[in-house]
Every structure is written in C-alpha cells, then in structure tokens.
Image: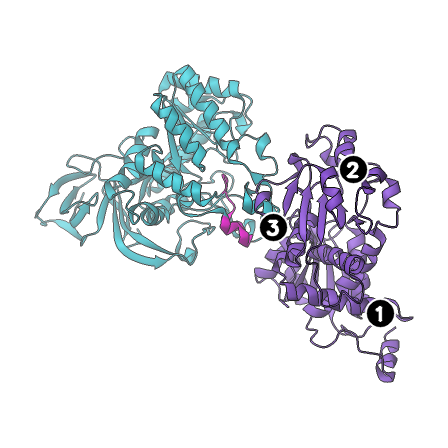
Amino acid sequence: MSKTLIRGAKVLGGEPQDVLIDGTVIEAVGSGLPTEGAEVVEADGKVLLPGLVDLHTHLREPGREDSETVLTGTRAAASGGYTSVFAMANTFPVADTAGVVEQVWRLGQQYGYCDVQPIGAVTVGLEGAKLAELGAMYESAAGVTVFSDDGKCVHDAQIMRRALEYVKAFGGVIAQHAQEPRLTEGAEMNEGVVSAELGLGGWPAVAEESIIARDVLLAEHVGSRVHICHLSTAGSVEIVRWAKSRGIQVTAEVTPHHLLLTDELVRTYNPVYKVNPPLRTERDVMALREALADGTIDIVATDHAPHPHEDKDCEWAAAAMGMVGLETALSVVQETMVDTGLLDWAGVADRMSFTPARIGRATGHGRPVSAGEPANLTLVDTAYRGRVDPAGFASRSRNTPYEGRELPGRVTHTWLRGKATLVDGKLT
Amino acid sequence: MQRHLISAADLTRDDAVLILDTAEEMARVADRPIKKLPTLRGRTVVNLFFEDSTRTRISFEAAEKRLSADVINFTAKGSSVSKGESLKDTAQTLEAMGVDAVVIRHSASGAPYRLATSGWIDAAVINAGDGTHQHPTQALLDAFTMRRRLVGRDAGLGQDLAGKRITIVGDVLHSRVARSNVDLLHTLGAEVTLVAPPTLLPVGVETWPCAVSYDLDSTLPKSDAVMMLRVQRERMNAAFFPTEREYSRRYGLDGERMARMPEHAIVMHPGPMVRGMEITAEVADSDRCTVVEQVANGVSIRMAVLYLLLGGNEPAVAHPSPSSESRTTEEK
C-alpha cells in the first residue's frame, strides 16, 4: 500500500510536524521526514486530529432510507472528519436483535467511509417493557457494547436497573435518553419564558434531571456504567458532577447544537430548531460549555438526526424532531469551545475522539497520533471561516440549523486506516 | 399597519387604537338597513379552518361579506387535509387560486406565523386562533367592548385603556385568549391581573406584563372588568385541579362574588360558557355580562382588521352622501 506524508501539520494543535502513513498505520511522526515514495499532503499549519468518533448518530437504515442510509451517513461522517460512528437503534425494524445490528455493521464495512458500530436497543422494540437480547448483540459480528433506547427513555426503574446489571457481564454500557415521559407529555420546546409566550408545550428541565439523578443512583447501586445522552440543562451538569465526585461510573455527552443555540431561536417557529431534548437557555448553554471544558461532560456527540425536507417544511407541531450534525460538529465546537478559549485542540481530540472511543470500546479508534497506531486521522483548516451551505452536504438530509450561518473551521482530509476518504474537502 | 395579523403583541398602541376606531365606523354599518360596504369588492378571502370553531368562522364570514369580499370557506374535515395534505400544500393551492387574504385557525401554535413567513403564500394572513398561542382578533374585540363600556362609545374614539384594571380568571395555561389579551391590554395601558390556580399558569408567566394572583376574592374589588376563561372539560382528569366543585368554589364567578366588584365593572367571557362551573347563570345573564356584545363587536373588529390589512388607507366607511349611499345599496 502506498505511503502518504502529511507535511507541517499541527498535531493536536502543537508545533508543526510531519506524519508519515504507511499502509494502514502511522509509520512516523517527526520533523523533516523523507518524502520518497510518498504522496505529500501539504498541511501548511492545519491541525491534525485523531479521526473523530461519534457515539450518537442516527443512520436511519434499515427502514428510513429516505432520510439517510449507512452509505450517505458514513459519507457525511467522513466529510465531518469522523472515522467511527455509533449508529442508534431506533431504526425500522428496531436494532434489537443480532441480525439487525450485523446488517448495519456489514453495510459500514462494505462502504468503507467510516466504521459503523451499531448500538443495540435496551428493550424489545424500544417499548421499555422487556430486555432485548443484549448478550446476543454483544456476541454478534457487530460486537455491540453500547445499548440505548434513544428517542425514548428507559423510564421503568426496574428495567433500567436490570439492564445496567445485565451488561456488566460483558462490559457494556447503557446510554440513556433522559426524559421522564409523564413530565414531557405534549412537550414541543424548552419549558420557560419562551414557551409560555409562544404557546408551545413545555419540556421542563426537571424531566431530564430527575431521570439522570435516578440513573446515577441506580448505576451506583449495581456498580455498573451509565452514559447520559445529550445533556441539555445546567441542572443535569450539577447532577453528573455530583455523581462523579462520588465515584459513580457515569459518563455524559453534549451535542454541538446545545453548545451554541438557545430556545430564543424557536421564536421563528422554524422547525429546523425542533430537537429533543430541546434547545435550552443561555444559562444552560454556558453551563454545558464549562462542563465540557472541565471534563464533567466527557464528550461531544452529534445526535445527527436526518429528516427529509417535507418533515421539516411544515408547521412546528407537525415537524419531526432532530437536526443533522456530522458535517458541522467540529466547526461548532471550534466556535463555542476553541475560539472562546475554553478548550485547546488536544482537548477537542479528547472530547471528540479519545474518550468517545473509550466509552464505546471502538477498537482502533481514538488512539494517539504516534508511530505504530492505526492511521485514522482528520486534518482541519482552522483558519477557514465560511457560511454553511447544506446544498453541499453528503448527508441525504438537509435539516441543519446553521444554514447561512458563518462558522469557523473546515475538515479538508480524513483517513480511515490510511485510506483517504476525504481529500481537499471532497469525498473519494 | 403590517401586512399580517399574527399576534396581538405585534400591534403598536397606535395600530390598536386605529383598529378600534375603524371598528366603530364599521359598527355603524350594522345600524344601517343594508349592512354592506363595497370596500373589498373583487377581493377573495379564504377562511382556512383546521380546527372547529363555528363562532369565529361565522364572525369572520359575516365581516367579509359585509365588506363585499368573495368568501371561500375551507374546513379540514372531509378535505384534502384529512387525506394527509400538509399546510404548505394547502397554502400553495390557495396561492395558485389568487386569494388576497387567509384567515387561519389551527390547533398548532405558530401555524399562522409559518404561513405568513415561510414564502408558501403571498396573501395577507390573519390569525383566527392558533393552538395555545394567540387569538388577536378576540383580544381586539374584547378591548373594543371594554372601551365602549368603560370609556364610552364616542368618548372612546382615539382613546386607549390607560389605567383600567382588568382581571382574567381561569385556565391561562391553555388559553390563547389570555395571552392575546395580556399583550394587547398592556399595549393599551391597562393593568392586567391573571388569577388562576398555579397549575393553570404557564412557567415563565412572571415575565409577562401583568400581575399574577391565586386569590380571586381579593382581586375583584379592584377590577373594572373581569374576564372569565373557559375551562375545558378535558382538563378535569389531568390533575390541574382536584374537582370541578373545588375549582368552582375557588375560581368560579357567582352572584356573591360579582357583588364585590365595583358597580361599573363588567363581566366578560370569550365563550362558549360552561354555566355552573366557571360562571353561574345568574352572572351570565346579568346586565353586567357582555358576552352577547362581544359577539357583535367581533364582526366590527374583523371588518376593521380585514379592511386595514387589505390596503385600506381611506376612511373605511364613506360618510353618507347620495352617491355613496346608492353604491352601498347596489352591493346587496
């Protein structure tokens, strides 16, 4: 296999260095590496990161291929600098059996833009009543390690307890969509000043916080690992911070959109801002940024949720919840965390590659950029600023809240085990 | 005036007073033998009702017909909407038919705003009630009724409601009428107090330009108008309050409570009333209750809104002259 020399890249934002890829692995990192026999990529001061890992992606296949497929979703992932994504289980049929998770995993392997790690459903059909065959999904070719009913909350405390206990047998983790269902009946946006004014059903912060509080206590009680999906409130941050200080095995994620956008945007009634959990207040946004910076929140996850145009080009109540995020995540993180001085690029590598890979046990991903490691890499032009144009997205769906917004940073190259999946911003 | 009427909050004081004054002119039409003006002749108005509301639809229809508009009534039941057609598709169909204004009633908060701002249609959009958001013409007709009763029919021209104390009682949480009235009455200078059990007040109500109380009895003696809101039956079993009896005891308006109001104070209700629960028959049938006037005033207000939104920049009602009288007569 051919060699590639990435010349003058700021590895994790440090001093410019050369990185030599030989086949599927990094052969050397240093200064003035020989160029003979290698294709040279002039990094010219761009930042080189380990390939990003998204612990929370909706690929929609099987069942909603009009929104996204494994092919289009992984192409979007490669465009955004990702080399591994975890595909949520709320497909049709639900990924609650070894057969479905293997299908998704094999499609990822076949297309080769990005590794796909299926997430298995916690309960059969996401119905919250009966545990799915968690062990069979773990033992399948897909090797499922993360289980989630995302889109729905595992709201029954006993089922949640059993799931947490059961996955201890093979080191699994339960990723919880924290939403107390009774407190969010009819909910359409964050409950607060704006919802009161707009007459939209309120999704109160306590509906998220009460479930997180319960689940960290359950995780402590049974000595298991719980991962909290898409934290959205300042109160949730406080609970996770308390749980970590107590030694509970809890990890948490925040989405890029919850780091940038607030419920004030809902005043437009534009369903592009309709998402679950909803956009919260400025105070919540600031608390989430601080928590990501200080490590209370472990990772950034996109909650990439593609929907076809017609599911968003309608009135608010009728619109689907969710927004695409794979192709803009790094830019939003740069805008909210790096350019604000809250996080350096090494911190970004930690929150968007090393730690999500560790939580999901994504073998070969989230590894140091050093000799002998798999060549899963992402090159970012951090000096770039431009307006988001969804017409250029690789995702099958265009439901982005950032259309027309100026954001910094652009992923120019992505390598998956040494093979370029993105070159000069174009998919291979 | 703006092109659309989506929210009472969008109206300036001068806009609102202009509508109220124009409505007084329109009301005079109702006193004529021929209750019709040629003002909107050749204009097409669609009443686009995705939610049942016979009273509001008939009120708009009467207003449109008195202004000589061509009227199309569209109800969702039995229409293409029930076959799955979206609001956007419906709007574009109407656009293709060249309608000038759309009066929309929808169960989804924000649907009229989307219709007006998403580029689906070029017509003027009038919100006839959306979800639990807004019902601006209801607020205008309520303000019109208050101004007539509390300031005076002729004395009120050009006037707002500065200093008037208005109490709104009941299910504020689910009420577009309450939201619209708080916004408009504040703009018109009134002091508004919302009275409800805490369960029927929205989180965030403290930021609204009004006072909030849980105690009806202490508020009544200070009220120039008391507006009772309808309590929907479906709320009974949703733990918003323990029983109908308890609600009625704490927040219902009966004769005894009405007696604590100042003599000049009026009782209002957007209708339809649930007699016996939020309001007793004794109160509903009293001279102080303005429910029937509100219905009549609704037509005048809607005529004024339609006239002003569809480009009215001359006096809405031509002062009687031989020629104008004859034109009006021809329009029957």
Residue under label 1: B29
Task: Spot the residue most to the right.
Answer: B33
Q: Secondary structure at mark 1?
A: helix
Label 3 sits on residue = B209
On the picture, is A121 further left or further right than B276?
Answer: left
What secondary structure is found at the residue carrying circle 2?
Answer: loop
Rendered colour, chain B: purple
Residue B89 figure quarter: bottom right
Which quarter of the rendered picture does the N terminus of chain B lie within? Answer: bottom right
Q: Position of residue A320 (x, y in %)?
A: 55, 45
Judging from the image, mark 2 belongs to the subunit labelled B
- Which SS class for mark 3? loop
State which mark lies toward you, 2 or 1.
2
Residues rendered magenta in the picture: A264-278
Residue shown at 9% from the left, 49% from the top = A36
Disc 2 to disc 1, C-alpha distance? 37 Å
The answer for which chain carries disc 3 is: B
State which tag comes first along the sequence, 2 or 1.
Answer: 1
Question: Could you tell me the amino acid type at mark 2?
Answer: Gly
* Residue A206 against residue B184 in the figure, above or below: above
Q: Quadrant of residue B204?
A: top right
Q: Identify the colour scheme used.
A: by chain
Whether residue B328 is visible, yes or no, is yes
Q: Residue furthest bottom?
A: B323
Q: CA distance from mark 3 to mark 1?
A: 35 Å
- Which residue type carries mark 1? Val
Image coordinates of residue A80 in percent, x first then y, are 34, 47
Amino acid at circle 3: Pro
The residue wearing badge 2 is: B252
Rendering colour (chain A): cyan
Mark 2 packing: few (<14 Cα in 10 Å), some, or many (20+)? many
Q: CA distance from mark 2 to mark 3?
A: 24 Å
